[in-house]
Amino acid sequence: VTLGGGVIGDLAGFVAATYMRGVPLIQVPTTFLAQVDSSVGGKVAVNLPQGKNLVGCFYQPSLVYIDVSALKSLPEREFRSGLAEVVKYGFIGDADFLAFIEANVDRILNLNEEILEKVVIRSCSIKAHFVELDEKDRGIRAHLNYGHTIGHALEAMSEYRKYLHGEAVSIGMVAAARISHYLGMLQGAEVERHEGIISRLGLPRGLGGVKASRIKEQMEIDKKFTGEANRFVLLKKIGEAAVV
């Protein structure tokens, strides 16, 4: 039984998957990010100095038990970090959910339990949909990595100390939206919508003092790097993603 955030869930899940070639696993996530994302889907892994989640496997839990009242114990920064994964689901798969988040920002930030339960249930159902279609991450499940290519690079570059996962992903999503616009896939107004909702949620949109070449070097040892190129999850429109 794992009780804690995403790091605890990943570590204990990895142990459960490998000890005795597998023992039953129950996830009890206590952070927002773990509740809406990492506890669901069966990815369990640990980091190496070279990059994030490079040693791991797929191992589904027998049960995920979520209680949103645990979120009241979190530091505000940790709670906001989880919101990055929530808005990601709206960006890649459900424009109506994104609109719901935009309409309820204040109640979400005030930890309204009724709203939080709706957010958690919808987030988990969207993730479960992608996992059911592609459990081993060989196709459409990659859409869940929106914002993560650059996000994981930022985390590794800072030795996992400067950015919380959601903060790095929020920067990565803005970058991915701008790349989508640059390639003619996404309208400029939709890029501005990214920046607007991320800003309202109190998450970072950009960074200074980091060279693009350094980010590129780090991305080249990411799991998603293949055939001398990196796979980016980009948007055709809000609610519809594509791997490029």
Image (cartoon, rainbow, N blue to C red):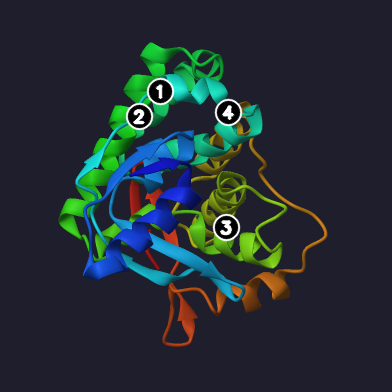
C-alpha distance separating marks 2 and 1: 8 Å
Question: Does residue 222 appear in this view?
Answer: yes
Q: What residue would you read off at disc 3?
A: 151
Q: Earlier in the sequence, mark 2 or mark 1?
A: 1
Disc 3: CA contacts within 10 A as few (<14), some (14-19) or many (>=20) = many
Closer to us: 126 or 192 = 126
Amino acid at pointer 4: Leu
Residue 56 picture location, percent across and down:
38, 69
Q: Earlier in the sequence, mark 3 or mark 4?
A: 4
Amino acid at pointer 1: Val
Indicate the quadrant containing the N terminus: top left, top right, bottom left or bottom right: top left
Amino acid at pointer 3: Gly
Residue 43 picture location, percent across and down:
33, 59
Q: What residue would you read off at disc 2?
A: 120
Say whether residue 42 is left or right of residue 196.
left
C-alpha distance separating marks 2 and 4: 16 Å
Q: Earlier in the sequence, mark 2 or mark 3?
A: 2
C-alpha distance separating marks 3 and 4: 22 Å
